[in-house]
Image (cartoon, rainbow, N blue to C red):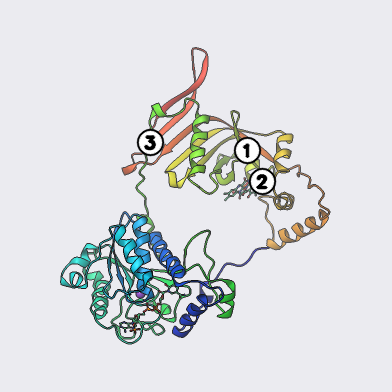
């Protein structure tokens, strides 16, 4: 039913010659790319990969050192995109190519007020220490021999930077190499021992053989432009790019200190006078914000239940309806959650909308929705999910995946005439009727906003009382 995950062991690495041949084919009669197109996409993928690992708030000052060829062009494009992403790039471009493509890239950077620095500026002093990130776009897959002036000095400078990192104050810039770390043999790696030692490598199109020797923390692939015909011709095995991403991590997962993982939330203040008197209206407002922010499945919520033993259990479910009576989701009436709800109707649901720094908690009692309501929703689901509901005795132990696949196939055949799939009797909805809400918004220094609503009656009029809780 589904494909297997891509294994990073099976990825293709290119020789220097193959890299040039792939390049040539990409710009041949079919698929007929222009160098401008490929360079724009390559540079954008470099900038995207940088942004994925090194946030602009922390690694703002970027120095792109650009060489005389297309690798240098990728660096110029990446610097422009980084500028748009909120970084403050500067560029060192000592051997400027005179073709219109390159002069155009320079003009575009100048029009964004990106400063150009000279080799003398860099060699003369501590200037390099003023940067948080150095982008090495000196040489790519056409590099041969030992770097000639002025790149010999520049390679040495950047190489020292990484070599001495441990002895420095920890404030020296990180180094990101474009396609091939400069000074490295394209196939053998850093044979001279004088090449740069990047923290991150962004391979383009497909990694070159030297990338096997890369030992830095972050290896990405960019250049999402290889059509199947080119991949087939060169027998390229490349990882899929997730969603609309311009780059994909191909190296080992980064080693992180879990205890150091934290985000300092910054949001507008959430004030008592700004929230809706009815918490359901407030929920709808925030839900609309989550939709507008493009959050994937903003209707995913954690549902916590506990049976008569009082031991809570949680799982995610999808909110499928919300009205004055409460929050509705659908599930199997013989599942673990269903058993717990039958023993104890009190439950809690929780939404977390990451990019908005928002959490909503709702507590209340749960009851089944009507059979008609469940049927109406069931028949709106994709046919595959309807069959899935018949297949799965949710929360029961099964001997393996094959059982599901077998039963699914049988039922697919049974209903192959297109006839309606009946809703199983043990499948339907629940509605949680709220008696407590909490709207949480993250703030700096963990001094978050928390507004809690509980039912209130003043002068015979039912409403809600809002209080602020300490974070
Ligand atoms: N389809 C793709 O793969 C794409 C790749 N892109 C990027 O392009 C580079 C390859 O670009 P290319 O222009 O072929 O080569 P380089 O940028 O690696 O370098 C060529 C220039 O460097 C000079 N060179 C070579 N060796 C030395 C040396 N030892 N010392 C000093 N200078 C050197 C060379 O000069 P020559 O006089 O020797 O000709 C050239 O001027 C690839 O790696 C990707 O980054 C595209 O942008 C997208 C598509
Ligand atoms: C994002 C997400 C949404 C889910 N939505 C539902 C749902 O709406 N209904 C459901 O029965 N299971 C849903 N599941 C699966 C449940 O988390 C859970 O595995 C299943 O309901 C069995 O839970 P139980 O054994 O505690 O009853 C979802 C899982 C995820 C990750
Ligand atoms: C087992 C199960 N049932 C029901 C649902 C609810 O969603 P839908 O009705 O869109 O399939 C989900 C969602 O993930 C699910 O995993
Ligand atoms: K490079």
Residue 266 falls in image quadrant? top left
Residue hosting label 2: 335
Relative to 145, 403 lies left or right: right
For the residue pair 312 and 43, the one nearer the viewer reads as 43
Residue hosting label 1: 341
Alpha carbons under labels 2 and 3: distance apart: 36 Å
Alpha carbons under labels 3 and 1: distance apart: 31 Å
Q: Where is residue 419 in the image (x, y as percent from the top left)?
A: 82, 49
Q: Is mark 2 within 8 Å of ligand 2?
A: yes
- Residue lying at 35% horizontally and 85% vertically, measured from the top left: 144
- Residue at far front of view: 100
- Residue at far bottom of view: 145
State if disc 2 and disc 1 touch (CB < 8 Å): no
Residue hosting label 3: 449
Q: Is mark 3 within 8 Å of ligand 2?
A: no
Q: Residues within 10 Å of mark 3 (few under 14, many from 20)?
A: many
For the residue pair 235 and 466, the one nearer the viewer reads as 235
Q: Position of residue 396 (x, y in %)?
A: 68, 52
Q: Position of residue 381 (x, y in %)?
A: 69, 46
Helix, strand or loop under label 1: helix
Helix, strand or loop under label 2: loop
Dot 3 or dot 1: first in sequence order is 1
Q: Residues within 10 Å of mark 1 (few under 14, many from 20)?
A: many
């Amino acid at each position: 039913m589904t494909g297997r995950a891509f294994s990073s062991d099976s990825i293709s690495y290119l020789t220097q010659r193959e890299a040039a041949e792939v390049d040539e084919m990409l710009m041949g009669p079919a698929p007929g790319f222009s160098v401008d197109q490929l360079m724009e996409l390559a540079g954008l993928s470099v900038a995207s990969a940088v942004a994925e690992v090194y946030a602009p708030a922390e690694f703002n000052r970027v120095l792109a050192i650009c060489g005389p060829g297309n690798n240098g062009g990728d660096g110029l494009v990446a610097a422009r995109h980084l500028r748009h992403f909120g970084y403050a790039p500067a560029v060192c471009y000592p051997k400027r190519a005179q073709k219109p493509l390159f002069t155009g890239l320079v003009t575009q950077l100048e029009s964004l007020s990106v400063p150009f620095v000279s080799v003398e500026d860099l060699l003369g002093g501590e200037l390099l220490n003023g940067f948080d990130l150095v982008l090495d776009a000196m040489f790519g897959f056409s590099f041969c021999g030992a770097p000639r002036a002025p790149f010999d000095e520049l390679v040495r400078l950047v190489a020292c930077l990484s070599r001495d990192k441990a002895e420095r104050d920890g404030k020296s810039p990180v180094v990101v190499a474009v396609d091939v770390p400069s000074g490295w043999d394209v196939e053998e790696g850093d044979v001279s021992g004088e090449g740069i030692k990047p923290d991150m490598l962004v391979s383009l199109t497909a990694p070159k053989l030297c990338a096997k020797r890369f030992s830095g923390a972050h290896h990405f692939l960019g250049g999402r432009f290889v059509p199947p015909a080119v991949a087939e011709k060169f027998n390229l095995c490349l990882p899929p790019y997730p969603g609309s991403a311009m780059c994909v991590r191909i190296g080992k997962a980064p080693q992180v200190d879990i205890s150091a993982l934290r985000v300092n939330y910054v949001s507008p203040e959430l004030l008592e006078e700004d929230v809706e008197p009815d918490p359901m209206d407030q929920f709808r407002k925030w839900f609309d914000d989550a939709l507008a922010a493009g959050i994937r499945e903003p209707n995913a919520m954690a549902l916590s239940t506990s049976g008569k033993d009082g031991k809570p259990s949680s799982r995610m479910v999808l909110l499928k309806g919300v009205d004055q009576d409460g929050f509705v989701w659908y599930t199997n009436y013989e599942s673990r959650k269903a058993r717990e709800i039958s023993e104890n109707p009190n439950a809690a649901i929780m939404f977390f909308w990451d990019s908005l720094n928002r959490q909503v908690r709702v507590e209340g009692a749960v009851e089944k929705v009507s059979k008609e309501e469940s049927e109406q929703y069931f028949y709106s689901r994709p046919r595959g999910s309807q069959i899935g509901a018949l297949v799965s005795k949710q929360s029961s132990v099964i001997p393996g995946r094959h059982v599901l696949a077998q039963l699914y196939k049988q039922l697919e055949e049974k209903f192959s005439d297109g006839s309606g799939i009946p809703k199983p009797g043990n499948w339907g909805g629940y509605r949680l009727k709220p008696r407590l809400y909490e709207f949480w918004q993250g703030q700096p220094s963990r001094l978050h906003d928390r507004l809690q609503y509980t039912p209130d009656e003043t002068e015979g009029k039912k409403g809600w009382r809002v209080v602020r809780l300490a974070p």
